[in-house]
């Protein structure tokens, strides 16, 4: 005895409905998976940035507490110095000037964190110091640092951290403020040390 689910006559549309339906279903699943991957990966990238900048903030604030950060050399300073070993030849490590370099307990990290192979920055603004992703980095919100987001001395990074089209993605800030009292330029040496 033969059991037939559907017996279609040759040349009718019914012969094609089931295969077309199965194909459409698989195409829909692939589209759904790709869409989910794209959205999820952007959220994960934002989480990676947030994790890195939080870690860098904690390390730099610890260095400030132990070594007293006097200043940074530039308005935008690459964070590429946290793997420097304990013995410092002077009071400067990377672009950072320290009051008590003997208290340096490096290396603080084995490798300096990067995002898309670009080093994070310590950016000086009129409102203080911030840690941000590096120049020319494309953020998860499709904005590019240095092109869409300008990080100059007048930049209001605190406000940008609350704007989805700037330094925030899905309620995740992509920058963080440093709680340090460094100055713009290294403090001058006392006169008795200059003689």
Image (cartoon, rainbow, N blue to C red):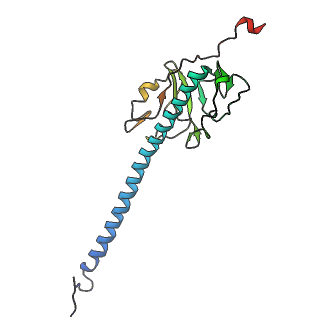
Tell me the residue at 60%/28% (across/down): 77
Residue ranking furthest to the bottom:
1
Which image quarter: residue 25? bottom left
Q: Position of residue 65 (x, y in %)?
A: 56, 21
Say left or right for 65 vs 143.
right
Q: Nearer the viewer, residue 18 or 121?
A: 121
Tell me the residue at 51%/34% (across/down): 55
Q: Which quadrant does the N terminus fall into? A: bottom left
Q: Position of residue 66 (x, y in %)?
A: 59, 22
Q: 31 above or below 152?
A: below
Q: 144 above or below 37?
A: above
Residue ranking furthest to the right:
195
Q: Which quadrant does the C terminus fall into? A: top right
Q: 111 above or below 30?
A: above
* Number of marks: 0
Which image quarter: residue 16? bottom left
Tell me the residue at 58%/39% (across/down): 118
Q: Position of residue 176 (x, y in %)?
A: 47, 29
């Amino acid at each position: 005895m033969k059991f037939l689910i559907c017996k279609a006559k040759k040349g009718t549309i019914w012969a094609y409905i089931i295969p077309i339906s199965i194909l459409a279903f698989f195409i829909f699943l692939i589209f759904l998976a790709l869409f989910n991957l794209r959205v999820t990966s952007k959220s994960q990238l934002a989480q990676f940035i947030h994790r890195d900048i939080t870690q860098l903030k904690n390390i730099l604030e610890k260095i400030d507490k132990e070594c007293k950060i006097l200043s940074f050399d530039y308005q935008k300073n690459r964070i590429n110095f946290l793997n420097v070993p304990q013995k410092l030849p002077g009071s400067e490590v990377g672009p950072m000037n320290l009051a008590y370099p003997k208290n340096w307990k490096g290396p603080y990290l084995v490798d300096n964190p990067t995002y898309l192979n670009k080093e994070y920055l310590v950016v000086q603004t009129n409102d203080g110091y911030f840690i941000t992703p590096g120049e020319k980095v494309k953020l998860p919100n499709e904005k590019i640092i240095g092109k869409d987001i300008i990080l100059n001395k007048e930049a209001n990074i605190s406000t940008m951290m609350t704007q989805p089209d700037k330094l925030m993605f899905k309620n995740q800030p992509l920058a963080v403020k440093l709680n340090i009292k460094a100055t713009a330029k290294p403090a001058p040496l006392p006169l008795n040390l200059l003689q």
